[in-house]
Amino acid sequence: MKKRRKLLGALLCTVLSVSMLAGCGSTEAGDPPAGEESDSNTNSDQEQVQKPEEDIRTISLLAYSDMELPGLEAVCELAEEKLGIHVDIEIVSANDEIVQVRAAAGELNDVVLMNSGAVLSTVHPEEYFMPLNDEAEIMEKLDENYIQSVTLDGVTYGIPQASSQAGCVLYNKEIYEKYQLEVPKTWDEFVNNCKVLEENGETPLIGAFGDAWTSQVLMLGDFYNLNAADPNFVENYSAGKAKYAENDSALKSFAKYEDVLDFYNEDYLSTTYDDGCQKLADGEGAHWIMLTQVLGNIYSLYGEEVTNKIGAFAIPSDDANVNGLTVWMPNSVYGNKQSENADAVLEFMKFYLSDEALNAFTAAQPPVGPYCVKGYEIPDDAYEAVRVDMQSYFDQGTICSAMEFMTSVKGNNAEKICQEVASGLTTGAEAAEKYDEDSYKCAIQLGLDWER
């Protein structure tokens, strides 16, 4: 999914790709607000004494070249100061096979950063990664939805490396205030808001399909609604017993494209992702159905004041009582089960989840979604769309992982199929049938006995 920024680098992979989305992952969040420093970087009450060099322990960490690392580096720097653990970071190309090969050869780094979700099974974590189920200090802090994305056969292996992000509706709050619009609770209300804006000469909806991956976000981001209507869909879909074209709730995710065809900017088929960021920031469009990584990009280009004029709400369902956020889980930190520095690795992972470490991370890399860590309060200088809008869904427990974190079966041509229906070249029903056929091919490649 990416003419991508680093963040999307991990969402458009095989995982949407973020598996279906073809892109997901880390985020380009920009620098922290000028003149503001996190309390995590200094502690006036507890002045730390630099540990003697001979007391420093060293662990190695493997990270991919498409990951954004300022937050990680800030935590590693703090870990050396507070724990006496130096983290030697090695950057390699974004290829999970590197992890597999090194693990099999007994040459894996002490710590590995890689994707969460269905891709985890491909590296045989039961053989190579530290199980965390007995580490109460870790497990009690992890969000349940996140846990599902790093758990295989009941065993949990990872902790979140960065913040989450979501596929949702980003909107210009000044435009909403101008026309006295309310955040919609149903899809019909959203469409009606678009009609009001169109009647008043505004561009209701930004399309940036010049970068094809962006076309998938509506379908993928609607997954919370599909999962709420049919909690067994993913399991049945993975077995080939459920189809998008044969399930009313799943079909709706494609049909929604038809509902908004008339609301896009005139040049939406050639507009790029970067253009979309500019349009949303400048109020040239009222809504953009997009990944919240956009917030980081807009911040880096336009600053804090403009970024905080942008709000976020979940893609609405047909039921006002069903409103929830589809979340792309962050990359994860995994410990090497065979590491000779296991104690230091576990100490580092526990520290990574502390408020002190997360504050340091946030100061260096502002979050584009809530952290999947219970009890952590996002600082007041975080983007309002994250700290207020998105966090409310986490607090209410109305979130679910994007589908790609639950199943390896995904249509590899999702962006092309979604672009066709978003262009009016095909109907939602036809797009759903094409996606089912595409998923069938994927299942066969995976060696699954998928029913046609």
Image: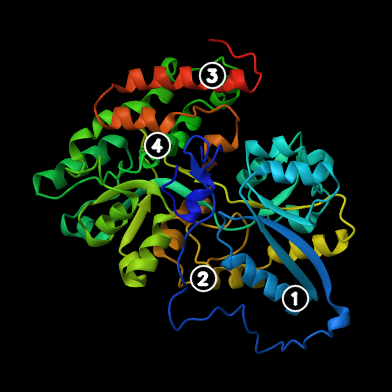
Mark-to-mark CA distance, 2 and 4: 31 Å
Above or below: residue 252 compared with residue 105: above
Label 2 crowd bin: few (<14), some (14–19), many (20+), radius 10 Å: some
Q: Nearer the viewer, mark 3 or mark 4?
A: 3
Mark-to-mark CA distance, 3 and 4: 19 Å
For residue 379, which numbered disc appears in the image? 2
Mark-to-mark CA distance, 1 and 4: 41 Å
Q: In this view of the protein, which residue sits in the foreground, 34 or 208?
A: 208
Amino acid type at image mark 4: Gln
Q: Secondary structure at mark 1?
A: helix
**Residue 241 falls in image quadrant:** top right
Q: Position of residue 181 (x, y in %)?
A: 21, 51
Question: What's the residue at 69%, 39% (across, down)?
Answer: 120
Above or below: residue 190 compared with residue 83: above
Q: Position of residue 22 (x, y in %)?
A: 48, 39
**Left or right placement of residue 44 versus residue 369 in this view:** right
**Left or right placement of residue 23 versus residue 157 in this view:** left
Amino acid type at image mark 2: Pro
| Residue position for label 1 | 80
Counting residues from the N terminus, which is met first, the one under dot 3 or under dot 1?
Answer: 1
Mark-to-mark CA distance, 2 and 3: 45 Å
Regarding residue 398, the answer to whether it shows in the image is no
**Residue 96 falls in image quadrant:** top right
| Residue position for label 4 | 216
**Left or right placement of residue 170 versus residue 55 in this view:** left
Counting residues from the N terminus, which is met first, the one under dot 2 or under dot 3?
Answer: 2
For residue 441, which numbered disc appears in the image? 3
Q: Secondary structure at mark 4?
A: helix
